[in-house]
Amino acid sequence: MIASIKEALGVYKRNFWRVLLIGLTIILPIQLIYTIVVNFVSLPFAFFNIPLWSNLFQGIFMIMSLFLILIPLISLVVQETRTQKVNTGKIYVDMLRYSFFLYLISIPVSILTTIGFFLLIIPGLVLLIFSMGMPFVKVTEDDSVKGVLKKSIAFGKEHFMNICGLLLLFAAVDFLASFLLTYLAIGLTGLMAITNWALMILNMFLLPVFVFTVAKLYLDWNGEADLVHEEAYFQQLKQYQ
């Protein structure tokens, strides 16, 4: 896992401006839409003091948004792994190509996962880890629904502890950073809106590290990274012959 994090940081560093572009044009707008939709849907429940339903819808929409946000970031790391270069246009083509499929499949996944978290936490965590690979399978291999489900569960089983550890690590980092940003934003401005913007910008920069790390784990798992390394090795041998 440590090696995957290091590789992810390398991808982040080499493609920082593309990550920033993706953040400004895709991640930030999706987060903004998510915030508006959640506030709109939660308003009636908050008015009648029914927080459970507000939290339920918040969890559902969060996972649905995450599935869409993952697409361009996965496309970036897959392109670099395969060809050692990234076509920015293809990132947006892949976003358009896979959004509808992942949006549809995220609906039942997000509902079941959120209910699992609310019931006993552990079922929700297990479902999240088993479904985490779906966007990676689809963007990397463009598989069918059956193939996406099967490979995502297999990937989740084999890397259960790694994914669980990554989720806990990034959740802890996000919590600490969010706490500090909230404290500073409210202390300096007193405006909750500034806090929301600060948190969205934080996620825009932090989330790609997590996605790149899981993408590296997936590409190692499906054997594609090994094939790329072997091709590079044989090409290097040919140059010396």
Image (cartoon, rainbow, N blue to C red):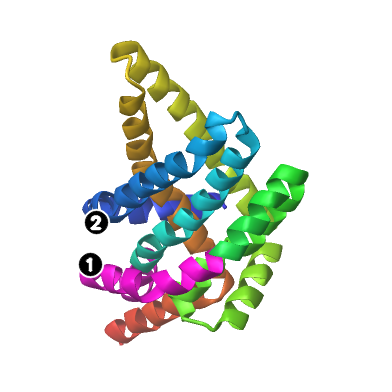
Left/right of residue 186 with respect to residue 172 in the rendered view: left
Q: What residue sits 75% from the left and 47% below the top?
A: 122
- 112 to 177, vertically: above or below: below
For label 1, the crowd category at 10 Å Cα-Cα, with few meaning under 14, some 14 to 19 and many 20 or more, is some
Q: Looking at the picture, which amino acid does disc 2 mark?
A: Arg
Residue 6, can we see it? yes
**Please, what secondary structure does the residue beneath circle 2 have?**
helix
Viewer-proximal residue among 104 and 166: 104
Left/right of residue 56 with respect to residue 183 in the rendered view: right
Q: Which mark is residue 88?
A: 1
Q: Percent x, y for residue 90?
A: 26, 73
Disc 1 vs disc 2: Cβ atoms closer than 8 Å? yes
In the rendered image, which quarter is residue 25 located in?
A: bottom left
Left/right of residue 210 with respect to residue 126 in the rendered view: left
Q: Which mark is residue 34?
A: none
First of labels 1, 2 by sequence position: 2
Q: Magenta part of the protein: which range?
A: 77-106
Q: What residue sits 36% from the left and 31% below the top?
A: 196
In the image, residue 210 lies in the stretch drawn in magenta:
no
For label 2, the crowd category at 10 Å Cα-Cα, with few meaning under 14, some 14 to 19 and many 20 or more, is some
| Mark 2, residue position | 18
Viewer-proximal residue among 185 and 14: 185
